[in-house]
Image (cartoon, helix red, strand yellow):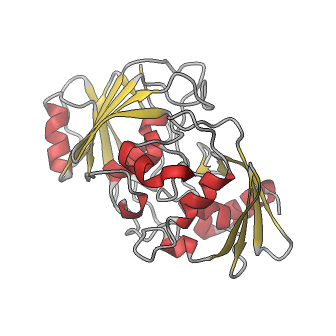
Amino acid sequence: MTNTVLRRNLLSAGAAAAMLAAAGMPSFARAKQGGLLRAALPGGMAGFDPRKMTGNLFAMAAAQGAVFDTLTQIGPDGVLQGELARDWRSDPSGLVWDITLRADALFHNGKSFDARDAAASLRLHQDPRSGAYHITNLIKRIQTPSRHRLRISLHSPRSDFPLLLSDYHLIMLPAPNIDRAMADGIGTGLYRPVHLADNLFEGRRVSTHYKDGQAGWFDEIRLTAVPDIKRGQDLLLARKVDAALMQDTNLPDGFTARQIPAQVTATPDLSRDPRPFAGHNIAHHTRLHIPASTSAVWPMDGARMAERWWMA
């Protein structure tokens, strides 16, 4: 089964289509490079251990949204597409998936991404305490037939398995020293960590990346963790951040807001986190450009605002 066929199948299924809410991406002709993104997000974290990121928007935005990549992702049109995976196909039984990996992705330490890294990153979640154990528990065997090919055998057929690989827990880490990579934030993402604390993440755009010209428009990002939406709203109104979730849309001059409707979801177990999200408001400074269509699966454009937004 090719990924093209899988896309059609996923979009034709009501449950999957609900999960594939269209997520905005910039019009490349109008997107501008440069600037600093300052955002306030609920959550907090002490490191990049993906097993512990469940239900944490701040951690998601810093990890999957900036420092690391997953094998697949939900694209701007709501269709499943490759991120570190170029292509995927199953055997006729739907039990064995062959995944072709990108050959041009580099970790921040200069190491090339390959199948051994992908295999080790998935095996990390075969711990029942991981937030992605419900996904890795489907896996019977992981093999690496070649440097950029991954073969995954399942216990039972899952036509939506490539969709599950987009889960934010399943970020890719370098195999030689995963513990060090989690501590230091060594990923293949658009942003290299400059500072990480329980309530603050600062990242700087890498000089070259396989997504150049397609994503990663900010030179720097600064994410502040807040205990609740009210605190983020206070920081926004004090002009200490440029974007935050809001409880209302009564904003002063220079700010605008967008209402995101509730996401009604019959989920294919993309995550064990609570669904559906209630409707919410994204508020931001008018100099910050947010695409017309944004994901409602998670707030803040599916936590990928560092990739998709830019300074007007």
Write the residue at 63% across / 31% down. 210
Q: Position of residue 111 (x, y in %)?
A: 58, 38
User: In the rendered view, does 165 fall on the left or right side of 33?
Assistant: right
Judge whether 43 appears above or below 30 on screen.
below
State the quadrant of the N terminus: bottom right
Res 92 quadrant in image: bottom right
Write the residue at 56% across / 33% down. 110
Res 98 quadrant in image: bottom right
Q: Position of residue 211 (x, y in %)?
A: 60, 31
Judge whether 216 appears above or below 230 on screen.
above
Write the residue at 27% across / 51% down. 46
Spot the residue most to the front.
176
Judge whether 41 appears above or below 312 on screen.
below
Inspect this view and state whether residue 261 appears: yes
User: In the rendered view, does 224 fall on the left or right side of 82?
Assistant: left
Inspect this view and state whether residue 260 appears: no
Near-viewer residue (83 or 7): 83
Near-viewer residue (34 or 194): 194
Q: Position of residue 25 (x, y in %)?
A: 54, 35
Res 258 quadrant in image: top left
Q: Position of residue 97 (x, y in %)?
A: 75, 65
